[in-house]
Structure formats: structure tokens, C-alpha cells
């Protein structure tokens, strides 16, 4: 016989209570003395505070204290969640500051390397070897090309229109 654990497919995390996450916007079901109260922690706090005021006005001190304790519980829950959110936000901001400082250092290092390369005498442009400003070496082939100018090109003959192609727009009609 197989155990029931091997048959459970698709419900891996169904019974696990959610940890972390965004408690501030999460919807809770609070089973208070006056029935269920459903909503976000802020809404539940407001509801229990209203029930506390109503119990005080009706003179029921036990229910008033009970509602006040429920409201305090959710107030503490919300305050802890806010502290966690704030701590996470500060941690992310610190990480962003560190990343930005690293990028700034890298940028300064690159600029310093570029300046050092620009000021390095081995990278300076070499002076020209001939008087005309050219760094090319004179070869016998270059001398022949300079001595013998190219003959001018022959002009092309004009295009002749074929008989079936009209020359003017009037002939096309």
C-alpha cells in the first residue's frame, strides 16, 4: 500500500503559512470576540478601535479591554512589518550607494588611464619624414605614376532611343 504523501500532487505549499511578504497589504481574518473581522492590518485596527469605543460607551469594560488588546496586537504587527520594510529599503539604498561609488571609482580609473595614455610619449604622433607632410616612402613605382599623367577619358557616346520607346510624353499617348 502506498503512503498518502506520494499521492499529493500540486499542493506542495498549501499548508505552509506564508512568511515574510508584504504584511501591510495582506488580508487577515481575525476571529475576535464579536465574530470575524477581515481586512488589512490597518483596517482591522480601525475596526477594533471602533468596537472598543462602542463597548466603552455601552459600559462593557471587559469587551472594551478585549477589543483594545486585539487592536494593540494588530498595531504591533503593523509596526513590525513597517520596521522590516524600512530596514529592507535602507539596505537597498546602501547597496545602491555602494554600486554607485564603485561605478564612480571605475569611471575615474578609466579617465586617469586615458589621460596617462594621452600623455605617454610613446603614443605621441610621429613627425613627418618628408617636407610635404606625407609619411609615405618614395618608391620607383610612385615616381613613374607622378611622371606619366593619365590620358583623359573618352566621352561616352549618347544613348540612342529605341523605336518602340517614346522620347516625349506626347508620343506616349
Image (cartoon, rainbow, N blue to C red):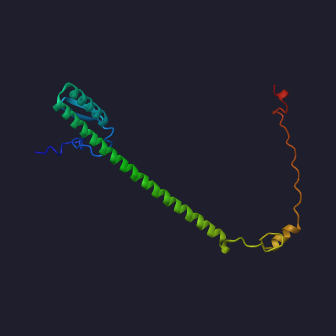
At x 53%, y 62%, the residue is: 106
Q: Is residue 115 left or right of residue 148?
A: left
Q: Is residue 84 left or right of residue 165?
A: left
Q: Nearer the viewer, residue 95 or 51?
A: 51
Q: Is residue 50 above or below residue 140?
A: above
Q: Nearer the viewer, residue 114 or 20?
A: 20
Q: Is residue 62 above or below residue 104?
A: above
Q: Nearer the viewer, residue 118 or 105?
A: 105
Image x and y of residue 101, in percent: 49, 59
At x 20%, y 25%, the residue is: 58
Q: Quadrant of residue 53?
A: top left
Please give the count of numbered marks on the rendered protein: 0
Q: Nearer the viewer, residue 154 or 36?
A: 36
Q: Quadrant of residue 167?
A: top right
Q: Is residue 15 left or right of residue 21?
A: left
Image x and y of residue 5, in percent: 16, 45
Q: Is residue 165 left or right of residue 83?
A: right
The image quadrant where one finds the C terminus is top right
Find the residue positioned furthest to the left.
1
At x 88%, y 53%, the residue is: 154
The image quadrant where one finds the N terminus is top left
Image x and y of residue 36, in percent: 21, 30
At x 27%, y 42%, the residue is: 77
Amino acid at each position: 500500500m502506498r503512503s498518502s504523501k506520494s499521492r499529493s500532487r500540486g499542493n506542495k505549499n498549501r499548508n505552509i503559512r506564508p512568511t515574510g511578504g508584504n504584511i501591510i497589504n495582506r488580508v487577515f481574518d481575525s476571529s475576535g470576540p464579536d465574530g470575524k473581522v477581515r481586512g488589512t492590518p490597518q483596517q482591522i485596527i480601525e475596526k477594533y478601535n471602533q468596537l472598543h469605543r462602542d463597548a466603552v460607551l455601552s459600559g462593557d469594560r471587559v469587551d472594551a479591554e478585549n477589543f483594545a488588546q486585539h487592536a494593540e496586537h494588530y498595531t504591533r504587527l503593523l509596526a513590525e512589518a513597517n520596521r522590516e520594510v524600512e530596514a529592507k529599503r535602507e539596505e537597498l539604498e546602501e547597496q545602491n550607494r555602494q554600486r554607485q561609488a564603485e561605478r564612480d571609482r571605475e569611471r575615474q580609473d578609466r579617465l586617469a588611464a586615458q589621460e596617462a595614455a594621452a600623455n605617454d610619449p610613446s603614443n605621441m604622433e610621429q613627425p613627418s619624414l618628408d617636407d610635404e607632410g606625407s609619411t609615405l616612402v618614395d618608391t620607383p613605382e610612385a615616381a613613374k605614376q607622378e611622371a606619366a599623367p593619365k590620358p583623359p577619358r573618352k566621352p561616352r557616346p549618347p544613348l540612342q532611343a529605341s523605336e518602340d520607346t517614346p522620347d516625349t510624353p506626347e508620343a506616349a499617348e
